[in-house]
Amino acid sequence: MTIDPHTFAEFRRMTEKFHGCAAPGVLLGGHMVTAARTALPEDTLFEALVETRNCLPDAVQLLTPCSTGNGRLHVINHGKMALSLFDKYSGRGIRCFVDPSRLGPWPEIRAWFMKEKSREEQNDALLEREIEQAGTSFLALAEMRADNAFLGKKSGGPVALCPCCKESYPRKHGDKCLLCQGEIPFVMWPRQTKTP
């Protein structure tokens, strides 16, 4: 089995280097990206929408030009092992997902996917071998259309200086930056300016 254009072994090495280990979710994600990409018209300028933040986004970043940094990889955390590749302008694309009804021949994948075994009980070598051998056999594809919010070129818009922290921020966020409005995902100490 190949994970286009790589052999499974090559993709496994890429996964280890990028993700830190050959995680089943990334390896399986390689098959998902391949299946969805093959179903798109060849010269489609596409973006990706991934429905979990665990592992699957890394498969997209390894195998496509879509990344969080260039804004072409969108991650929504629905907790589903599913991804869509869609035309950047029309929104038409393909959604690929694991079909549990097709997991019968692959008991170790099923046990991992359905969380039927604890991490300690999993047979990693067998799981990886099944992922390699199964290829796309337990995946399903469906046509989809992305919401208009995901389409076209997105601009950050005008920038302003926050009157509170004196840092730049997108003006569309209001009269001060989101941090100073209280949307802080971390604890800040009193501001100390240092040169790196």
Image (tube, rainbow, N blue to C red):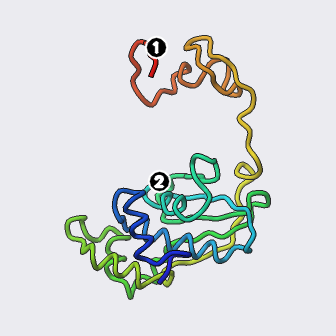
Query: In the displayed image of the protein, which residue is found farthest to the right?
Result: 90
Is 74 drawn above or below residue 37 in the view shown? Answer: above
| Residue 191 falls left or right of residue 116 | right
| Residue 104 falls left or right of residue 30 | left
Query: In the displayed image of the protein, which residue is found farthest to the bottom?
Result: 105
Q: Which mark is residue 173?
A: none
| Residue 20 falls left or right of residue 46 | left
Q: Earlier in the sequence, mark 1 or mark 2?
A: 2
Residue 106: x, y in percent? 37, 84
When asked about the image quadrant of residue 186, the answer is top left
Is 138 drawn above or below residue 159 in the view shown? Answer: below
| Residue 39 falls left or right of residue 81 | right
Which marked residue is nearer to the observer: mark 1 or mark 2?
1
Query: In the displayed image of the protein, which residue is found farthest to the left?
Result: 120
Three-letter amino acid code at disc 2? Arg
Three-letter amino acid code at disc 1? Thr
Residue 57: x, y in percent? 50, 57
Near mark 1 (Cα within 10 A), the count class, few <14, some 14-19 or many ≥20, is few
Residue under pointer 2: 53
Q: Residue at 40%, 70% (x, y): give it.
A: 12
Q: Residue at 64%, 53% (x, y): give it.
A: 72
Residue 125: x, y in percent? 27, 76
Which element is circle 2 on? loop
Residue under pointer 1: 193
Residue 196: x, y in percent? 44, 23
Query: In the displayed image of the protein, which residue is found farthest to the front?
Result: 196
Q: Residue at 39%, 86% (x, y): give it.
A: 104
Which element is circle 1 on? loop
Whole-angstrom CA distance, mark 1 to mark 2, is 33 Å
Near mark 2 (Cα within 10 A), the count class, few <14, some 14-19 or many ≥20, is some
